[in-house]
């Protein structure tokens, strides 16, 4: 089975692309959703978060997102600390998930594949690209953020043009070129590569 990474900057529409692969019967591991789940369900991770951020990190047995946000907002050290706790737990969980899949290929959708140094865990990496103004607008609509907040978050990721050069394949999601034909073509490519891999 091929392990595929799916990545892109904020507002690139990688989740939309992932949903098209899902319709084709390909299992998707959504890293952000998994991280949110693990912060509540992974006991070792919970204890680490409480150890560093105090008992106020959880309320009614659930992560207090507002409290954590207040701790890491504009505090680079605390944000990096939080990421250093959550990322390894998510990577472990995704590896276990990948090992259980039985399809010709499976996809992990994650924003920070290159930033986290996990690119070597995949056979191929697909990038989702969109122009900066469109990405900014999408993120503002989705999160109710200001343009400045979105651009600040984008500044913490690798520049889109560099990220796309690092990918093996790129899907353009600019609302000009249809996404579905691009995904279908890539799906056929991965099915062929998987078949060749199995010989």
Image (cartoon, rainbow, N blue to C red):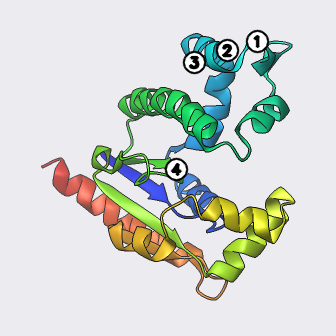
Q: Quadrant of residue 101?
A: top left
Q: Are the two marked residues, 2 and 3, in contact with CB atoms closer than 8 angstroms?
A: no
Element on which disc 1 rests: helix
Of marks 3 and 1, the one in the foreground = 1
User: CA separation, marks 4 and 2?
Assistant: 25 Å
Q: Are the two marked residues, 2 and 1, in contact with CB atoms closer than 8 angstroms?
A: yes
Task: Identify which residue is drawn at 44% across, 52% down.
Answer: 115
Task: Identify which residue is drawn at 81% across, 57% down.
Answer: 143
Q: Are the two marked residues, 4 and 1, in contact with CB atoms closer than 8 angstroms?
A: no
- Which residue does the numbered mark 4 point to in the structure image? 110
Q: Position of residue 136 (x, y in %)?
A: 72, 73
User: CA separation, marks 4 and 3?
Assistant: 19 Å
- Which residue does the numbered mark 2 point to in the structure image? 50
User: CA separation, marks 2 and 1?
Assistant: 5 Å
- Which residue does the numbered mark 3 point to in the structure image? 45
Q: Position of residue 169 (x, y in %)?
A: 37, 70
User: CA separation, marks 3 and 1?
Assistant: 13 Å
Q: What is the crowding at mark 4: few (fewer than 14 residues within 10 Å), some, or many (at least 20)?
A: some
């Amino acid at each position: 089975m091929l392990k595929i990474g799916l990545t892109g900057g904020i507002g690139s529409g990688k989740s939309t692309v992932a949903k098209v692969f899902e319709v084709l019967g390909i299992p998707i591991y959504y890293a952000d959703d998994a991280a949110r789940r693990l912060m509540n369900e992974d006991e070792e991770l919970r204890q680490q978060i409480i150890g560093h951020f105090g008992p106020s990190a959880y309320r009614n047995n659930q992560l207090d997102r507002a409290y954590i946000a207040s701790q890491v907002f504009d505090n680079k050290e605390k944000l990096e600390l939080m990421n250093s706790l959550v990322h390894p737990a998510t990577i472990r969980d995704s590896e276990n998930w990948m090992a259980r899949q039985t399809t010709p290929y499976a996809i992990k959708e994650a924003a920070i594949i290159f930033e986290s140094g996990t690119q070597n865990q995949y056979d191929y990496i697909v990038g989702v690209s969109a122009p900066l103004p469109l990405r900014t607008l999408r993120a503002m609509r989705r999160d109710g953020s200001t343009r400045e907040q979105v651009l600040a978050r984008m500044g913490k990721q690798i520049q889109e043009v560099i990220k796309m050069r690092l990918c093996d394949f790129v899907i353009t999601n600019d609302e000009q070129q249809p996404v579905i034909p691009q995904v279908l073509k890539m799906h056929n490519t991965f099915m062929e590569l998987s078949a060749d891999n199995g010989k």
